[in-house]
Amino acid sequence: MLDRLTLDQLRTLIAVADSGSFSAAGRNLRRVQSAVSQTMQALESTLGIALFDRSGKVPALTDAGKAILEEARKLVRGAESLRAKAESIASDVEPELSLAVDAMFPNRLLMACLKRLSEEFPDLPVNVFTEGLGGAEQRIRDHTARLGLYSWRPVQDDLASEFVAALTMVPVVAADHPLAKVKGPITRAILEDQVQLVLTDRTQITARFSGGVISRRIWRFADLGTRLEYLLAGFGWCNMPLHLVEPHIESRKLVTLALAENPRWELPIHVVHDRARPPQRAGRMLIEDLKKYLTTCPRHTSMKSA
Amino acid sequence: MLDRLTLDQLRTLIAVADSGSFSAAGRNLRRVQSAVSQTMQALESTLGIALFDRSGKVPALTDAGKAILEEARKLVRGAESLRAKAESIASDVEPELSLAVDAMFPNRLLMACLKRLSEEFPDLPVNVFTEGLGGAEQRIRDHTARLGLYSWRPVQDDLASEFVAALTMVPVVAADHPLAKVKGPITRAILEDQVQLVLTDRTQITARFSGGVISRRIWRFADLGTRLEYLLAGFGWCNMPLHLVEPHIESRKLVTLALAENPRWELPIHVVHDRARPPQRAGRMLIEDLKKYLTTCPRHTSMKSA
DNA sequence: ATTTGCCCATCAGATTATATGATGGATATA
DNA sequence: TATATCCATCATATAATCTGATGGGCAAAT
């Protein structure tokens, strides 16, 4: 034995501290009391300090013993972390799964897929980050998320993507907005004078991307929810995912604009990961489920899949 | 054995990775090669993954092996940390010693004491933080320093202190400053109209302490060095520790002011620690040395000790 | 092609460490 | 006093690790 300190000694110390006596620890560890006694003596001998005051009926931890107990807990947690890593390698399952999802993506769909994932991998920690423009990609790049679900930009050598869905986008305005009263197709000339409510990128990733901007007068918002509120309040018009505005259209709070150009268009959504960090079993299962769901659930009529 | 993972297995893995082969690792660990081979097999069996690709002449670490190696290094460092803690408990020596020292304290004296400390405890890491007004006490409070050497304020229930020295303070001005030309004692009325160069507290600890401020016109500095430069440049007067200005006085760059009140006064310096964190052997030795040095070295004539 | 040096896996047996069960002493409670 | 529970120590059984021998393989030098 190269060095006499062992993880077993430390686990036994923790068991003694948590159970209150050597024999209780032995019962918990399914060992005889004398084995616990000997292991504690071996640990004291290895470290060269007294961990227990044995003047009472039951040995009491010394101050030194308490300090070492704390270190022991850290070390045993580290060992559990190493074991977890080995297990995830062996099973080809991620130790955890972090998703960065565009705020436009339909949450009901994602929740259904994540519920199934949780049933298959009950111990898998899952983080879901809802992000605005550019935020999801930023998370892939800084490794705070493993998978992204967002409108992906092409020509990215370090990122790999798969098309998952096309999000139907419609131009809408509040029912009491002047644009709602225009008869016939709305030309670009009419739109240019109206306020367009535009999403802005908190990051610098899409800073130069100005696709879809038609109006000369622009109000910018960093998140979809705030923009929707201003839309409903009649401040201007914008393109919105159909599934997010359908209830408001049906309740006549919003009106679809009949544009002369681009009346409806599709925003493609991809699942994206860093090429150096491909999805393992859990991630791959989630991706397959997302695609399957989009094929087999026609009630998501605003969605299209490959 | 409660659990088969051992620190010895992990140390052996590290030795193999660092030396390049099982037999080289065995030589480093003073073991036969077959013991290393068997230990690696036991580790692979314990974790359930292949750590080595054995198709070549020398086993090569797999990707999984590399990932586990990294975790192994963390864990072995944790074990070393626990051992260091046990050793410091056994020897009643601090694991490390951090000092927060007032910038006015004579560095030559402190260096001599620290040199002796280093000889007595060659493995003791030492940090010295030189601080302006209030900075040293802040470090004691936020536990970034264990001992402070500064002009201590009384009535601090959570801090304990010992008087170490009295620092002689003298009012000085640049030789070409108008104050240097005044004949006879300088009254308060004269001083009040001149710029006084004052140290200010970066922290809030002594924010309300304005002792020693006489002039109506005040320039504030956060550090002693900058203040000295402005003093030498003739911007104003101030009280300085004698040992810091003695060379300038002798070279006639600075002149001592003959004040009608308080011509010279003493700034008491204490060694301070948090009551909950008393000095152990190393700290106690340093304190004793500081006191002894101040008694036995009369060439530090600007210093007084208890 | 042969020789030399170095590498590793496996084996049998020696050595070391750990677990078990018995024993006796101590403490706390009824 | 009797009972229950605790621990340290001991002798022995069991398990784990180390050693040295053996044989196979690879790479470089002759």
Image (tube, coloured by chain):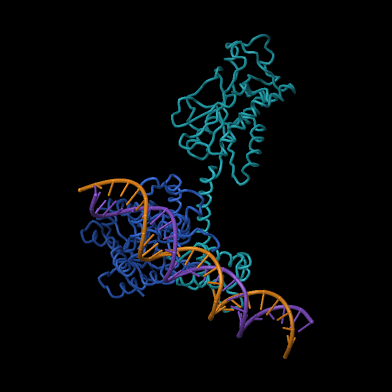
Chain colours: A blue, B cyan, C orange, D purple
**Left or right: residue A234 compared with residue B171:** left
- Quarter in which the N terminus of chain B is drawn: bottom left
Residue A150 visible to an observer of this rendering: no
Pick the front one: C26 or A44: C26
Where residue A147 sits: x, y (%)? 41, 65
Where residue B98 sits: x, y (%)? 56, 40
Q: Quadrant of residue B254 in the image? A: top right
**Left or right: residue A153 compared with residue B188:** left
Pick the front one: B90 or A276: B90
Against A64, is B24 above or below? below
Where residue B302 sits: x, y (%)? 66, 23
**Left or right: residue B234 compared with residue C18:** right
Against B272, is C2 above or below? below
Most extreme residue toward the top is B184
Pick the front one: A91 or B85: B85
Pick the front one: B271 or B210: B271
Residue A200 visible to an observer of this rendering: yes
- Quarter in which the C terminus of chain B is drawn: top right
Where residue B290 sits: x, y (%)? 61, 31
Q: Residue at x 65, y 38 (%)?
A: B116
Q: Residue at x 45, y 54 (%)?
A: A41
